[in-house]
Amino acid sequence: MESINEILTLDSKAKIKNISKGEILQRQGELTSMAFFVKKGLLRSYSIDEKGKEHIFMFASEGWIIADIESQEFNNPAELFIDCLEDSEVLIFDRKCFSVSELSERQLKTNIHLMARRIAVLQRRVIMLMSSSAIDRYTYFLDTYPELPNRVPQKMIASYLGIMPQTLSTIRNKLSRVK
C-alpha cells in the first residue's frame, strides 16, 4: 500500500494507535490477522529459540508494514513477536483487507510490485546469511538502513546479522580505522 489512507479505505476498522516503547503488539503462539503500518517510530519482529536467545527477523521504521505473514497465510500460530523499539504511532489493520477480490487493478499492481521488492530484499538477506562474511553483511546493512544504527542497540543489529555482539564491535572498530 502506498499510504495510510489507502489502507483505511480497504479496512474501515483500522485504527491509529500510539504505542509505547517496549510494548508487545504480537506474541509468539497467537493467532492473528493483524498487520502494522508504522506511521512514526520503530518496530521489530523476532523469535526466541529454545535457549531463550532472540533472533531478529525484521525492523520496520516509518512507512513499513510488519506482520507474521507465514502465520497468517497458513492460519498457524504466530512464530514472531512484534514489539516497539521506540514510542510509535502505528496503524493497526486486518491484513485480510488485501484480499485480491477487493483490490482495484492499480492497487493489485502496486501490491505485486511491493511484494516482489520485499521478496527480493529477503532473498538478498538469506543469500548473505548463507555466504557472505560478517563484515559484508554489516556493510550491506549500513547501506540499506543508514538510519537504524543510531536508533537500534548494537546487540539487536548483531542479532539481525546473525553474529555475536563482540563480532559486531570488532567489525565496527575495523571499519572506523579504515575511514
Image (cartoon, grey):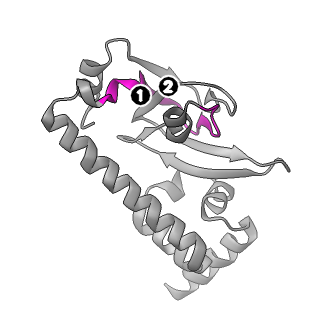
Give the magenta-colored segment's residue range.
Answer: 76-99
- Please tell me which residue lies in front, 22 or 101: 101
Sort mark 1 into few (<14), some (14-19) or many (20+) by Cα contacts within 10 Å: some
Residue 33 circle label: 2
Q: Position of residue 153 (x, y in %)?
A: 63, 53
Residue at (53% x, 31% y) in the render: 87
Q: In this image, 143 relative to 125: left or right?
A: left
Q: Are marks 1 and 2 in contact (CB under 8 Å)?
A: yes
Q: In this image, 124 relative to 133: left or right?
A: left
- Please tell me which residue lies in front, 9 or 136: 9
Residue type of the residue flagged with mark 1: Arg
Q: Position of residue 169 (x, y in %)?
A: 68, 71
- Please tell me which residue lies in front, 104 or 170: 104
Residue linked to disc 1:
95
Quarter-of-image position of residue 4: top left
Q: Does dot 2 land on a helix, a strand or a loop?
A: loop
Q: Is residue 152 visible?
A: no
Q: Is residue 28 magenta?
A: no
